[in-house]
Image (spheres, helix red, strand yellow):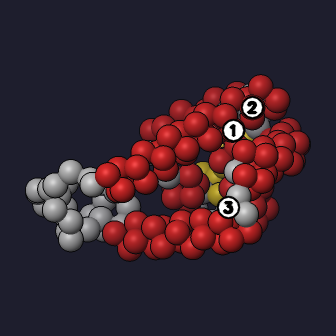
Amino acid sequence: MTGTAEWLDDREQRTWQAFYDMQVLLWRRLSHHLARETGLSEPDYVVLTALAAAPGGRMRPFELGLVTDFEKSRLHHHLTRMSERGLVTREKCADTPRGAEIAITPAGRDAIEGAAPLRAEHVRRWLIEQLTKEQLDALAEISEAVLANLRAAGRPGTQDEESCAPPGC
Protein backbone atom coordinates (compact mmCIF):
# COMPACT_ATOMS: atom_id res chain seq x y z
CA MET A 1 0.00 0.00 0.00
CA THR A 2 1.52 3.32 -1.03
CA GLY A 3 -0.98 5.79 0.47
CA THR A 4 -1.40 7.14 3.94
CA ALA A 5 -4.34 7.10 6.31
CA GLU A 6 -4.88 10.83 5.86
CA TRP A 7 -8.05 12.33 4.47
CA LEU A 8 -8.26 13.30 0.82
CA ASP A 9 -7.15 16.84 0.14
CA ASP A 10 -9.60 19.28 -1.49
CA ARG A 11 -8.51 18.45 -5.04
CA GLU A 12 -8.62 14.70 -4.44
CA GLN A 13 -12.03 14.96 -2.74
CA ARG A 14 -13.46 17.07 -5.57
CA THR A 15 -12.18 14.56 -8.14
CA TRP A 16 -13.43 11.55 -6.20
CA GLN A 17 -16.85 13.06 -5.46
CA ALA A 18 -17.43 14.15 -9.06
CA PHE A 19 -16.38 10.74 -10.37
CA TYR A 20 -18.51 8.91 -7.82
CA ASP A 21 -21.61 11.05 -8.37
CA MET A 22 -21.22 10.84 -12.15
CA GLN A 23 -20.96 7.08 -12.29
CA VAL A 24 -23.82 6.51 -9.81
CA LEU A 25 -26.16 8.84 -11.70
CA LEU A 26 -25.06 7.56 -15.11
CA TRP A 27 -25.66 3.92 -14.16
CA ARG A 28 -28.98 4.78 -12.52
CA ARG A 29 -30.09 6.59 -15.67
CA LEU A 30 -28.85 3.81 -17.98
CA SER A 31 -30.51 1.11 -15.87
CA HIS A 32 -33.80 2.97 -15.63
CA HIS A 33 -34.08 3.53 -19.37
CA LEU A 34 -32.93 0.00 -20.20
CA ALA A 35 -35.62 -1.50 -17.98
CA ARG A 36 -38.31 0.92 -19.14
CA GLU A 37 -37.59 0.53 -22.84
CA THR A 38 -36.65 -3.16 -23.04
CA GLY A 39 -37.75 -4.87 -19.83
CA LEU A 40 -34.15 -5.97 -19.21
CA SER A 41 -32.27 -5.31 -16.00
CA GLU A 42 -28.57 -4.42 -15.92
CA PRO A 43 -27.67 -7.99 -14.87
CA ASP A 44 -29.82 -9.33 -17.75
CA TYR A 45 -27.95 -7.06 -20.16
CA VAL A 46 -24.53 -8.11 -18.86
CA VAL A 47 -25.35 -11.84 -19.08
CA LEU A 48 -26.96 -11.61 -22.51
CA THR A 49 -24.10 -9.51 -23.89
CA ALA A 50 -21.57 -12.07 -22.70
CA LEU A 51 -23.54 -14.99 -24.11
CA ALA A 52 -24.22 -13.27 -27.43
CA ALA A 53 -20.47 -12.74 -27.88
CA ALA A 54 -19.51 -16.29 -26.81
CA PRO A 55 -18.90 -19.04 -29.38
CA GLY A 56 -22.22 -20.73 -30.07
CA GLY A 57 -23.92 -18.40 -27.59
CA ARG A 58 -22.86 -20.68 -24.72
CA MET A 59 -20.69 -20.43 -21.64
CA ARG A 60 -19.98 -22.51 -18.59
CA PRO A 61 -21.38 -20.87 -15.43
CA PHE A 62 -17.91 -20.29 -13.96
CA GLU A 63 -16.86 -18.49 -17.17
CA LEU A 64 -19.98 -16.37 -17.04
CA GLY A 65 -19.23 -15.58 -13.40
CA LEU A 66 -15.77 -14.34 -14.35
CA VAL A 67 -17.13 -12.15 -17.15
CA THR A 68 -20.02 -10.72 -15.13
CA ASP A 69 -18.15 -10.56 -11.80
CA PHE A 70 -21.27 -11.96 -10.10
CA GLU A 71 -20.86 -14.16 -7.05
CA LYS A 72 -21.78 -17.81 -7.63
CA SER A 73 -25.05 -17.64 -5.68
CA ARG A 74 -26.15 -14.37 -7.28
CA LEU A 75 -25.38 -15.73 -10.75
CA HIS A 76 -27.27 -18.97 -10.07
CA HIS A 77 -30.40 -17.15 -8.87
CA HIS A 78 -30.27 -14.62 -11.68
CA LEU A 79 -29.86 -17.31 -14.34
CA THR A 80 -32.84 -19.14 -12.84
CA ARG A 81 -34.97 -16.01 -13.24
CA MET A 82 -33.68 -15.46 -16.79
CA SER A 83 -34.42 -19.09 -17.64
CA GLU A 84 -37.96 -18.73 -16.33
CA ARG A 85 -38.38 -15.74 -18.68
CA GLY A 86 -37.06 -17.75 -21.64
CA LEU A 87 -33.88 -15.68 -22.15
CA VAL A 88 -31.38 -18.47 -21.39
CA THR A 89 -31.35 -22.23 -20.91
CA ARG A 90 -29.22 -24.53 -18.80
CA GLU A 91 -27.92 -27.46 -20.79
CA LYS A 92 -25.57 -30.36 -20.19
CA CYS A 93 -22.01 -29.67 -21.15
CA ALA A 94 -20.82 -31.79 -24.08
CA ASP A 95 -17.22 -31.81 -22.79
CA THR A 96 -17.99 -32.46 -19.12
CA PRO A 97 -20.97 -34.77 -18.50
CA ARG A 98 -21.51 -33.48 -14.94
CA GLY A 99 -21.08 -29.88 -16.04
CA ALA A 100 -23.58 -27.39 -17.39
CA GLU A 101 -23.59 -24.66 -19.97
CA ILE A 102 -25.74 -21.58 -20.14
CA ALA A 103 -27.06 -20.89 -23.63
CA ILE A 104 -28.76 -17.81 -24.99
CA THR A 105 -32.18 -18.57 -26.45
CA PRO A 106 -33.66 -16.98 -29.58
CA ALA A 107 -35.75 -14.77 -27.27
CA GLY A 108 -32.59 -13.79 -25.38
CA ARG A 109 -30.79 -12.99 -28.63
CA ASP A 110 -33.75 -10.90 -29.81
CA ALA A 111 -33.77 -9.07 -26.47
CA ILE A 112 -30.07 -8.17 -26.56
CA GLU A 113 -30.16 -7.24 -30.24
CA GLY A 114 -33.04 -4.87 -29.48
CA ALA A 115 -31.40 -3.45 -26.36
CA ALA A 116 -27.86 -2.89 -27.67
CA PRO A 117 -28.69 -0.01 -30.04
CA LEU A 118 -30.70 1.69 -27.28
CA ARG A 119 -27.79 1.29 -24.87
CA ALA A 120 -25.44 2.82 -27.44
CA GLU A 121 -27.84 5.73 -27.95
CA HIS A 122 -28.04 6.33 -24.21
CA VAL A 123 -24.27 6.14 -23.71
CA ARG A 124 -23.78 8.64 -26.52
CA ARG A 125 -26.44 11.00 -25.16
CA TRP A 126 -25.38 11.01 -21.50
CA LEU A 127 -21.62 10.50 -21.80
CA ILE A 128 -19.99 10.68 -25.23
CA GLU A 129 -21.75 13.82 -26.52
CA GLN A 130 -20.89 15.72 -23.35
CA LEU A 131 -17.16 15.44 -24.00
CA THR A 132 -14.73 16.78 -26.59
CA LYS A 133 -12.59 14.35 -28.56
CA GLU A 134 -9.67 15.24 -26.31
CA GLN A 135 -11.73 14.57 -23.19
CA LEU A 136 -12.87 11.22 -24.60
CA ASP A 137 -9.26 10.25 -25.21
CA ALA A 138 -8.31 11.39 -21.71
CA LEU A 139 -11.21 9.45 -20.16
CA ALA A 140 -10.17 6.32 -22.05
CA GLU A 141 -6.54 6.71 -20.91
CA ILE A 142 -7.58 7.35 -17.31
CA SER A 143 -9.95 4.40 -17.29
CA GLU A 144 -7.32 2.10 -18.81
CA ALA A 145 -4.73 3.16 -16.19
CA VAL A 146 -7.12 2.57 -13.28
CA LEU A 147 -8.27 -0.75 -14.75
CA ALA A 148 -4.70 -1.95 -15.21
CA ASN A 149 -3.96 -1.17 -11.56
CA LEU A 150 -7.14 -2.88 -10.33
CA ARG A 151 -6.54 -5.96 -12.48
CA ALA A 152 -2.94 -6.19 -11.30
CA ALA A 153 -4.21 -6.15 -7.69
CA GLY A 154 -6.32 -9.28 -8.34
CA ARG A 155 -9.98 -10.08 -7.84
CA PRO A 156 -11.43 -8.78 -4.55
CA GLY A 157 -11.96 -11.42 -1.91
CA THR A 158 -9.72 -14.00 -3.57
CA GLN A 159 -6.24 -15.25 -2.85
CA ASP A 160 -4.90 -13.40 -5.89
CA GLU A 161 -5.91 -10.03 -4.42
CA GLU A 162 -2.90 -8.13 -3.14
CA SER A 163 -2.80 -8.02 0.61
CA CYS A 164 -4.10 -4.87 2.18
CA ALA A 165 -2.91 -4.00 5.65
CA PRO A 166 -3.97 -1.09 7.86
CA PRO A 167 -3.87 1.82 8.07
CA GLY A 168 -4.68 2.26 4.35
CA CYS A 169 -7.55 -0.25 4.12
From the image, tell me which residue sits under label 3: 94
Res 54 → quadrant: bottom right
43 shown above or below 136: above
Res 22 → quadrant: top right
Check disc 2 and give the amino acid type: His
**Badge 1, how many Cα within 10 Å: few under 14, some, many 20+?**
some
Q: Residue 3's x, y, as percent?
A: 21, 65
The numbered mark at residue 30 is 1
Q: Secondary structure at mark 3?
A: loop
**Badge 2, how many Cα within 10 Å: few under 14, some, many 20+?**
some
The numbered mark at residue 33 is 2
Mark 1 or mark 3: whose residue is earlier in sequence = 1
Check disc 1 and give the amino acid type: Leu
Q: Residue at x 45, y 67 (%)?
A: 146
Check disc 3 and give the amino acid type: Ala
Q: Residue 99's x, y, as percent?
A: 56, 54
Q: Residue at x 16, y 62 (%)?
A: 4
The span from disc 2 to disc 3 (Cα, nearest Å) is 38 Å
Mark 2 or mark 3: whose residue is earlier in sequence = 2
Q: Secondary structure at mark 2?
A: helix
Q: Is residue 103 visible?
A: no
Q: Residue at x 26, y 53 (%)?
A: 8
In the foreground, 52 or 12? 12
The span from disc 1 to disc 3 (Cα, nearest Å) is 37 Å
The quadrant the C terminus occupies is bottom left
| Residues at circles 1 and 3 in contact by the CB criterion of under 8 Å | no
**Badge 3, how many Cα within 10 Å: few under 14, some, many 20+?**
few
In the foreground, 82 or 134? 134
| Residues at circles 1 and 2 in contact by the CB criterion of under 8 Å | yes
**Which residue of the protein is positioned furthest toward the front in this rendering?**
10
